[in-house]
Image (cartoon, rainbow, N blue to C red):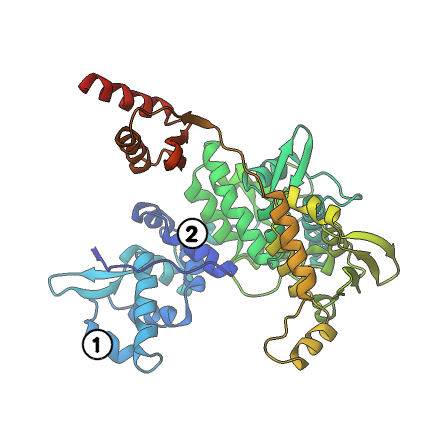
Amino acid sequence: MAVLAASAPPNPHSFKLGVSAYLDGLPAPVLGRLYEAPSSCLAIFRLLPPNARYIVLNLLWNDVGVSRADLDLIARRSEGKRQMESSLAALARLHILGLAGPQQLLRVDPAFGQSLRYALTGGGERASFGAPCDTPDDDPPTEAELDNYATQRWETILHFLVGSESSRRPGDSVLRLLEHSELMTRTGKRYDITARGFQFLLEEVNTQLWDLLLQYIGLAEREGKDPVDVLGFYFMLGSLTLGQDYAVEHLTDTQQACVDDLVALGLIYQSASGDERFYPTRLATTLTSSAAPLLKADAQAVSDDPTEQGFLLLETNYRVYAYTSNSLQIAVLKLFVSLRARFGNLVMGYLSRDSVRGALDRGIAADQIIAYMAAHAHPQMRKMAAGGGPDRPLLPPTVTDQIRLWELEKERIKTTSGYLYTAFSSQSDFEVVRDYARDNGLLIWEAEAERKLFVTGEGHVEVRNFVQSRKVEA
């Protein structure tokens, strides 16, 4: 079955696009293994753009295929030409739609089509969508208890990420994942947030979850786990029922090995490690849907409460007023603001060279600090900016410019190790060696008038051998 030419993958700015971008990079054999499970096919179908889902449903029960002209007639009722091409490209990247037969008709991949039909109509293996336990649980958790459990687990991770004083230390598996994901760096026993970790705090919960889960696949593969089984487990969890208990014994060996790690992330609840049953939390059951995980405001850096999303006032004298009682929001502010007072629903502080440099030393960029304050600007600041015309900035330019200047102070001098070449006998010798180093990407700096050049430490041996070979030739 030939595959259609695929265009570039989409830019991942939401959890759906992020997962789709990851799937786009998987080779056809890996996708083929995923398509053996109806739960995986249903999850991937949910992640498709609406127009792509429309095409798949129209071709799902057509084993022969249709011509491109016929497909144009089908799609014309729901989308324009540009959307049509985008949908076909998305389906081609995932090897869901391809060309088959001597007439090169378009049809759904047989394995994907069979599994998706099972998912929609019933059939296939019983455990594809989890196997409910046959015996009742003597003390089953309520949905509220599952929500509270997931919230506590997720809050622990986020509070540790920002270095909250009252934060508990997550388990070793979570610490390894945070370090592997480059959200935190470790120096001895100390963990510090990185620029990527700060950006992670600005994402909504499902995007944060998928960021970690996709990174976990690489970590699991390094530990000998089957990455296809791990990804298939995620897709299965997204189709399970909140409050229902499922049997561990029906999971594959790889999936059983992942249970404890997903318990630490708050996606799975078990009354005890090694229990024969597990409960998916709302964090798991909403993995492949657009439904909110329904976590408390403290469980995310960007609260779902509209009054919390615009809570920050910034004055031209560098003073900061934050109308929030969200402990996680306050912990994030402490990364770059020197806090001086705290009341019931208000914290006060100011931006200083030392407070901003502290954030810069952690790897947080000036533009990230500015973007965070703009994203959480108080409605009054937005109203004043709107009233001042289209060219009036939301944040005071004197403050944002100074933050960038503080960053430039830190980056004013950069050191690079290498070797300095001097005392060339002639200008032509200098130019020949310089051009060789430049063409091979080894040149760092040159001073043509003084016949000096500086090459990388790795390229020193190569340049030296080139100079010696010219002496021999001469």
Is 15 placed left or right of 448 in the picture?
right
Q: Nearer the viewer, residue 23 or 6?
A: 6
Q: Residue at x 76, y 45 (%)?
A: 164
Residue labelled with disc 2: 22
Q: Which residue is mark 1?
A: 70
Q: Is residue 27 above or below residue 470?
A: below
**Nearer the observer, 460 or 16:** 460
Q: CA distance from mark 1 to mark 2?
A: 31 Å
Q: Is residue 249 left or right of residue 52?
A: right
- The quadrant the N terminus occupies is bottom left
x and y, in percent, of residue 165 in the image: 79, 43
Name the residue located 58 percent from the left edge and 53 percent from the top edge.
208
What's the residue at 54%, 65% (across, down)?
A: 290
Q: From the top left corner, tell me how far across and down residue 176 is, in percent.
A: 59, 35
Q: Position of residue 436 (x, y in %)?
A: 28, 33
Quadrant showing the C terminus: top left
- Amino acid on which disc 1 is placed: Asp
Q: Number of numbered discs present?
A: 2
Secondary-structure class at tag 2: helix
- The amino acid type found where label 2 is placed reads Tyr
